[in-house]
């Protein structure tokens, strides 16, 4: 598999996610439109304004969905268009506020909602920059509504409400931005830089959690230790960068091949650990599928497939992580000895059974 091929796959996956998120905006706008329609029904929002707002509420998410579906978003610095979508939602909120009359005091709180979508995705400075829209937009909406003769509260009250909003919004932006920082830090500390997989620390934390669950409730899980065959030769023959490429393409293959819920981590060097849920048979199936997929995937940087060997161990109730890994490691050693490109099961006794062989 070439670098270009899996980059395309990654982009397609990210685009699907972005599209799903943008489609969710229809729900947000739909719910807001329903509230406004009710307000209109009881005479608190003008019908003519409702039509204008409905058109905007339909066109705005449709525009973003079209940009993402067509791939035009990929030309943006942030292809998720998160900042643009939040800005658009805030502008729409300003439009509603222009016609909100006596409802303005409560409707202005709706500025907080789009900001929350920026949590985990945008930094505090960007979120604070977005707060400039309500900071300037709300006074403009108030001025326009007074000019249109649709005033809500007394100007003094409107001013105090605006000031209160200016207190709440930057604080919300700050908290949302901190969530982004936390998320980024967590990703950096849990992930292996080269492969993008979980690192050893994250895998150990996950295993620790599982072993705690496993003892009283008998949650079955297995651990596999995987290791590329003759990887030193790959490095010696094609160079370290090509070796890195093998690791990267394997990481992508593993993500696509393993079952949902199986967790793979780069244990170190060219060694990986997979935590597999279910019993021995199911785990064995999953690892064999991965091993076979790896053996069948030509890595462009080296012009051939690179095989791997695996050792699989079923966690015994009360067993420590170190013992579990050691048993899987011993099974891996046996797989290497038995000729590589195969999976060996770690028996609870000394008896080990070969379960997969090279084609
Ligand atoms: N390119 C690259 N190579 C690495 C990395 N980490 C470890 N290696 C190399 O992986 C190789 C592992 O070699 P060995 O432990 O001898 O094992 P092997 O050649 O795979 O042989 P078997 O495991 O017995 O099949 C060494 O040459 C390491 O330098 C890495 O991040 N990138």
Image (spheres, grey):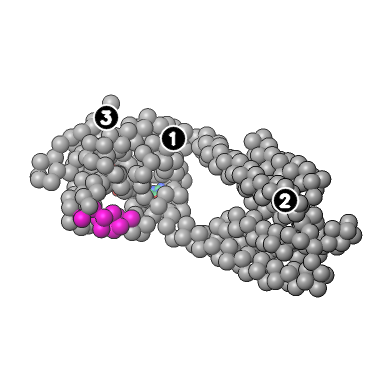
Q: Which mark is residue 299?
A: 1
Q: Is residue 317 above or below residue 354?
A: below
Q: Is mark 3 within 8 Å of ligand 1?
A: no
130 vs 17, left or right, is right
Q: Which residues are magenta?
A: 206-216
Q: Is residue 153 above or below residue 68?
A: below
Q: Nearer the viewer, residue 103 or 196?
A: 103
Residue tagged 3: 358
Q: Residue furthest top?
A: 359
Is there any visible trace of residue 162 in the rendered image?
Answer: yes
Q: Nearer the viewer, residue 164 or 67?
A: 164
Q: Residue 302: x and y, percent?
A: 43, 36
Predominant SS of the magenta segment: helix
Where is residue 232, by image quadrant?
A: top left
Q: Dot 2: within a 10 Å radius of its alpha carbon, few (fewer than 14), some, or many (20 or more) residues?
A: few
Q: From mark 3 to mark 2, how far is it between C-alphas?
A: 74 Å
- Mark in front: 2 vs 1: 2
Residue tagged 2: 42
Of pointers 3 and 1, the one earlier in the residue sequence: 1
Residue at x 22% of width, y 40% of height: 280
Residue at x 23% of width, y 32% of height: 356
Residue 208 is inside the magenta segment: yes
164 vs 158, left or right, is left
Q: Which mark is residue 33?
A: none
Of pointers 3 and 2, the one earlier in the residue sequence: 2
Residue at x 75% of width, y 65% of height: 135
């Amino acid at each position: 598999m070439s670098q270009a091929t899996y980059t395309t796959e990654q982009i397609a996956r990210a685009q699907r996610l972005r599209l799903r998120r943008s489609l969710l905006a229809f729900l947000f706008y739909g719910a807001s439109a329903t509230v406004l329609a009710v307000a209109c029904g009881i005479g608190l929002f003008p019908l003519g304004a409702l039509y204008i707002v409905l058109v905007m509420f339909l066109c705005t998410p449709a525009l973003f969905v079209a940009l993402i579906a067509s791939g035009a978003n990929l030309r943006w610095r942030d292809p998720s268009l998160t900042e643009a979508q939040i800005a658009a939602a805030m502008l729409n909120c300003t439009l509603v506020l222009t016609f909100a009359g006596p409802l303005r005091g409560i409707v202005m709180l709706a500025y907080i909602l789009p900001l929350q979508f920026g949590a985990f995705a945008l930094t505090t400075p960007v979120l604070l920059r977005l707060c400039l829209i309500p900071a300037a937009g709300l006074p403009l909406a108030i001025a326009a509504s007074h000019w249109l003769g649709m005033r809500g509260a007394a100007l003094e009250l409107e001013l105090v409400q605006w000031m209160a909003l200016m207190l709440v919004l930057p604080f919300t932006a700050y908290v949302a931005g901190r969530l982004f920082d936390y998320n980024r830090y967590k990703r950096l500390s849990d992930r292996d830089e080269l492969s993008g997989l979980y690192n050893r620390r994250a895998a150990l934390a996950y295993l620790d959690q599982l072993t705690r669950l496993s003892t009283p409730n008998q949650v079955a899980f297995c651990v596999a230790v995987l290791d590329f065959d003759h990887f030193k030769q790959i490095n010696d023959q094609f160079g370290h960068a090509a070796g890195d490429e093998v690791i990267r393409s394997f990481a992508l293959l593993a993500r696509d091949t393993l079952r949902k819920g199986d967790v793979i981590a780069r244990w170190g060097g060219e060694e990986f650990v997979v935590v597999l849920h279910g019993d021995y048979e199911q785990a064995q199936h999953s690892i064999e599928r991965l091993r076979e997929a790896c053996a069948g995937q030509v890595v462009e940087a080296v012009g051939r497939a690179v095989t791997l060997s695996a050792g699989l161990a079923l966690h015994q109730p009360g067993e420590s992580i170190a013992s579990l890994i050691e048993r899987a490691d011993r099974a891996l050693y046996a797989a290497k000895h038995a000729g590589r490109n195969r999976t060996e099961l770690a028996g609870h006794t000394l008896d080990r059974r070969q379960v997969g062989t090279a084609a």
